[in-house]
Amino acid sequence: MADTGTDRRRERLRITAGFFILLVVLLVLRYGSIMVVAPDRAIPPPPSVVERGAILDRNGRILAIQTRLDTVTIWKPDVEDIDETSRRLGEILDIAPQEIRNRIASADGFIILQRTITPSRSRAIEEQRANGYLRGVHLEEDFGRSYPEREAAAPIIGYVGVDNVGLSGIEYMFTDELSPPVPGDPGETRVLGNQVYLTLDLAIQTEIDRIANTVRSEHEADSVTIIAMNAKTAELLAVSSVPSFDPNSFRRYTADQRKNRVISRIYEPGSVFKVFTISSFLELGGIDMFDRFDTSGGYVSDDGFQITDLADYGVVNAEEIIRYSSNVGAAFASETVSSGAFYDILTRFGFGSQTEIDLNGEERGLLARPSEWSARTRQTIAIGQEIGVTAMQVVSAATTLANEGVLLRPQIVDRILDSDEALVREFDREPVREVLSPRTAQTMVEMMVGSTRPDGTARRIQVEGIEVAAKTGTAQVIDPDTGTYSDKHFIASTLALFPARDPEVIVYVVIDFPRGESVYGGRIAAPVADQLIEFLVPYLDIPRDTDRIVEHPGRIRTLEPSLPSVGDTLPDFRGLPARTLLPLLAREDLRVRIEGSGWVVGQSPPPGTSVRPGLELILTLE
């Protein structure tokens, strides 16, 4: 009997233990989980974080940088009043309250409302939460992209979308450099992207943006484009295209507003194009410097199409065709070469194809094959009509004139460094092909100098001590409604190279649809080129012919004027030469504008003015 009692007790213990184990399993299944990690299996590491590299100008000033910003999220079950929450968030985030309400109402739980908001908006939300509002609204730390210079060169720099994915410009073209693929090493949790240094100079960029905005306002133009390029390397020093957009909030702009007009806007260039057509006729041997053309009666093509000039220039040679911008002379000169040879050399200049600059969205332009030409095509192309170009194609083709006839590929990236400042890649001068002989290139530059003479179309370019080679243009634009040239819509432009004896810089100005007192390139675009050259000469330290050179057989000591330091108040800059002022342009706390050349004769605000961030300092030089 004792054995039987013992067996019953054991049976009861087994049943009790079974129930206990079952109860534990049920509790675990209801409220938790059991994790068993094998001794030879490691817990997976956290996912890698890629910190996108910065984009900088050639001198290291930041144009785009990675930031840690907040993302606005909502947990719907905690939202007490959807209408009130939507209204308050809409005011802070500049989103229609109804849009926020619809998103909350249609969601079941978690909502990502807006990613990477500005710090000021984060503070506004935190203040609302501290006052008992916005229950269910949270701020989650996230990576964002900041563009401190806002509209400056925005179409070039581009922007990023969700998860810092490059969508346009340098951000898109160099996304693998800026945000490299995550390595396979499971121990790596933070990846630093490379730094992309552009060829742009922010000081020049700031100045031409200011000029472009002023010109657009003065002439009530649709847009203004200004390009400054290193003539010897084809490095873009500055590219302004206004109106621009702010990449910090690019979604507020349409796709058309975000386009890079410098490489995507196709237009007929007008008389600026004579630089390339007359060069072509000289290179092909159709004309020489002694050939003369009688323009007094105008030009009439075989099919009765007439070409006229603004004035009667009489008998002209090649140099005078450029100086006076004679359409009639250019039309007669075009008859000296075949259509096939003319087409071939224009394609060698790069027209009708992409320049292959490292930017997305570039157009090829329009250049029909000779088999599609009419009886008047050769003559109209000679004067800059019946051909479509981009602004980048024009400045690219102009590199042939500064490099003994050799075409250069435009450069926008200078170098790429890794996170430790080690050189990853350097972008060098890149010759494409020889288009003109050195003699033809030099001859054209000399002829362009004639345009800046008192009787030339570019006579409003007069820079003391600097000889400038220039060509102006005024192009009519096709009216899409009528299919004929508009009598209101014009494009005024000027192309300039300086110093003419050995060009170092190419400047190109395009004013689209000016509605002011004039539409002519010589009247409104040439003065813009003059103003920009006046700024570039001292900034780039280009010597003037008027600079005094002193020779002395012995050693002499000179006392250079020093730049006074800027403290809490502005010092007196009067009497200082332009070269001494250049360090001011690199300051980030001041907006410095230098007008004229020589020595400072006036400043605004005056000496003693309190210095505050963003203060605009205007220095007048004579």
Image (spheres, helix red, strand yellow):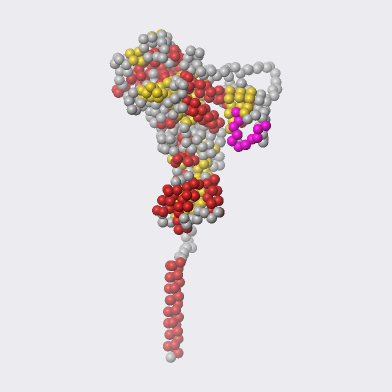
Of 413 and 71, the residue lying toward us: 71
* Chief secondary structure of the magenta portion: loop
Task: Return the residue nearer the eye: 439 or 572.
Answer: 572
Residue 607, how many percent across, how many down? 66, 30
Residue at (48% x, 19% y) in the render:
523
The image shows a total of numbered marks equal to 0
The quarter of the picture where the C terminus appears is top right
- Where in the figure is residue 123, as x and y percent of width and height? 55, 48
The quadrant of the rendering that contains the N terminus is bottom left
15 left or right, relative to 189: left
Residue, far bottom? 1
Residue 607 shows in the view: yes
Q: Position of residue 103 (x, y in %)?
A: 42, 51
Does residue 66 sit above or below 549 in this rendering? below
Q: Quadrant of residue 329?
A: top left
Q: Position of residue 572 (x, y in %)?
A: 67, 28
**Which segment is the magenta one?**
608-618
Magenta residue check for 612: yes
Q: Residue at x 47, y 36 (%)?
A: 245
Camera-nearest residue between 341 and 26: 26
